Image (spheres, helix red, strand yellow):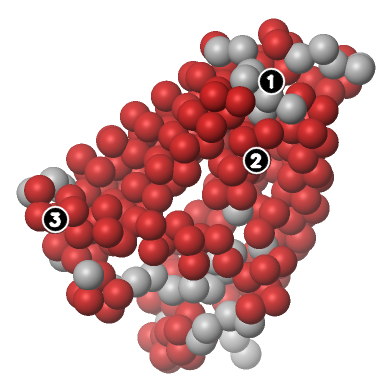
Amino acid sequence: MRELRGVRKSARGVSLYSRWVNRPLGRPAAAAALVMGLRPNHVTLISAALTYTGIAVIALVPPSPGTGIAVAALLVLGFALDSADGQLARLRREASPAGEWLDHMVDCAKVVALHAAVLVSLYRFHDLPAESWLLVPLVFQTAAVVIFCGGLLTDKLLSAARAAAPSTGADGAADRETPPPWWRALALLPADYGVLCWSFLLLAQAPWFRVGYALLAAANLLFAAAFLALWYRRVVAVTAPRR
């Protein structure tokens, strides 16, 4: 556990939930996986099994208090293990491109499938006041995919640019290690996947769930637009020719 605290990832661009709840939840899971002899890819697959089971329940089982608790628990545990696999890889010093690829593919499918399941649930089980509610999961899905893929692509481009310009590497490293202000981490909460996981506790309260889900969708749409502008400026700043 002490070693795991020493190999934690940067807190930059991370919300309060991921920083203070999800990563700490993943830490004992990573330690247990190490003791059990599991590899990071094993933890990734267990995370995927929990997450996709929760997603299947959303689409296939009528909403009820028990359904909401089961979905939230499966998604939250799956998200915690999604953090644990990376922590375990850093602890075992066996992070690899193949492991990163598997982790990102599982996450990408999760982002798409979760909102598709909500769309199916709304269509099958909810007495919607208007059919336009079926557009909400599509909007949320689009925003979530843009944030996920855009963030990954930006990180890769910036890392490649810093690697090609060693003179700026120290500044970039120092910037990444600077703890972000608490208000920024708080503001990022609506875009955190963990907050969405807990929102399914409201699944049986159909009007409340729809409103909460729609508010998160609107917040993610705004964040997607803001992130795109920010990421583009960063890529231009790093890759622009120096005079």
The C terminus appears in which quarter of the rendering? Answer: bottom right
Distance of label 1 from label 2 (alpha carbons) = 15 Å
- Circle 3 packing at 10 Å, graded few (<14), some (14-19), many (20+), is some
Camera-side residue of 108 and 163 = 108
Name the residue carrying label 3: 34
**Badge 1 amino acid:** Leu
Going by the image, does 189 lie left or right of 75? Answer: right
**Badge 2 amino acid:** Ser
- Circle 2 packing at 10 Å, graded few (<14), some (14-19), many (20+), is some
Residue at 61% over, 25% down:
65
Asked which quadrant contains residue 93, the reply is bottom left
* Viewer-side label of 3, 2: 2
Distance of label 3 from label 2 (alpha carbons) = 31 Å
Camera-side residue of 122 and 209 = 209
Camera-side residue of 120 and 203 = 203
Residue at 74% over, 56% down:
223
Q: Secondary structure at mark 3?
A: helix
Label 1 or label 2, whichever comes before in sequence order? 1
The image shows residue 11 at horizontal and vertical percentages of 49, 73
Looking at the image, which residue sits at the far top?
Answer: 124
Name the residue carrying label 1: 119
Residue at 80% over, 44% down:
215
Let me know if residue 116 appears in the view: no
* Viewer-side label of 1, 2: 2
Q: Is residue 119 above or below residue 243?
A: above
**Badge 3 amino acid:** Leu
